[in-house]
Image: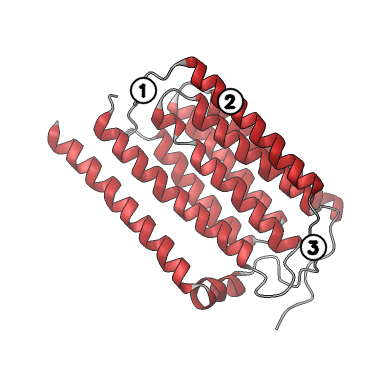
Amino acid sequence: MDSLHAIGFYVSATLSLGGALFVAFLPARETRGLAMAVTGIGLAGIALSLSAGFAAAVILVCYLAIAALVAGPQYRSFDPLTHVAWRQAGALGAAGLFALLAYAAFRGDFVSATFYGGAIGGSALGRTLFAHDALSTVAVAAVTLVALVGATAAWRARGRSR
Amino acid sequence: MAGPGPKPVTLGLVTVMFVAAALVAVGAFVATWRSDLTAALAGIPIMFGGAGAAFAGVARFSAAGGPELIGQEVAVLLAVAALGLVALGVGIAGREGAR
């Protein structure tokens, strides 16, 4: 059973990383949206294998919505003509970031603790979200609401200007 | 009351951190490599997903003392925030860009 669990984690990690790399390289927005959906499925699988079933459900819904936004017809291209040297420098910076984070993960001395939660953890997570850390939940909800209202206003303004 | 919890697993926090680091780095790569800003916006949820995986891993393997599910909570909030940010970014880019 444990090997199946580990296989699930590694398959999910492969899906999420592969999908993310396809997001980087695929030219068409529809296929990029599909790759983003695969990334979301992989991320949800990672969360599920880490005994975070409720978080996995939320992650899956959010990333499928992100994939729909990326692949949707409201997508517009916006290219400020960045020089290729800056893009290559950014890619090298991303590689350096991975090396730094991997070194920190490898050399880090992490506390080991026994996990007493369940596989889903919906009620415990709900108590944490709405009782223990209600202010942070409200803050993120407000940020998301403002972002969605702003996006709607931007789309409506574009529709009127046509 | 806390339950007995799932069976011990062979996975460790270091493995999860490696995957999370790779996701954050790939997200940063997407954000810098794509010349189209709207396409580069897709790197943000990938980076947030990597951070969320790291938080969920800490909650699973290394949360000693205090409420144990704070890591899962952060993973959920990051996913919701990523959705809002991408929606706002695609909306703003739609005002400025061309089809």
Q: Label 2 is found on which chain of the structure?
A: A
The N terminus of chain A is located in which quarter?
bottom right
Question: Which residue is disc 1 drawn over?
Answer: A79
Residue drawn where x is 51% and y is 22% of the image: A87
x, y (%) of residue A76? 32, 29
Disc 3 is placed on an element classified as loop
> Marks 1 and 2: CB-CB under 8 Å?
no
Name which residue type carries label 2: Ala
Which mark is in front, 1 or 3? 3
x, y (%) of residue A113? 80, 67
**Local crowd size for mark 2, using a 10 Å CA cut-off: few (<14), some (14–19), many (≥20):** many
Could you give the CA–CA distance between mark 2 and mark 3, rounded to whole angstroms?
Answer: 33 Å
Question: Which residue is disc 3 drawn over?
Answer: A111
Question: Which residue is disc 2 drawn over?
Answer: A91
> Marks 2 and 3: CB-CB under 8 Å?
no
**Colour style of the rendered protein structure:** secondary structure
The C terminus of chain A is located in which quarter?
top left
Tags 1 and 2 both on a single chain: yes
Q: Label 3 is found on which chain of the structure?
A: A
Residue A64 appears in the figure: yes
Of marks 1 and 3, which one's residue comes earlier in the chain?
1
Residue drawn where x is 31% and y is 55% of the image: A146
Q: Label 1 is found on which chain of the structure?
A: A
Residue A128 falls in which quadrant of the image?
A: bottom right
B30 and B76: which is toward the camera: B30
Of marks 1 and 2, which one's residue comes earlier in the chain?
1
Q: Is residue B71 above or below residue A97?
A: below
x, y (%) of residue A139? 41, 64
**Local crowd size for mark 3, using a 10 Å CA cut-off: few (<14), some (14–19), many (≥20):** few
Q: Is residue B9 above or below residue A23?
A: below
A99 and B24: which is toward the camera: A99
Residue drawn where x is 34% and y is 26% of the image: A78
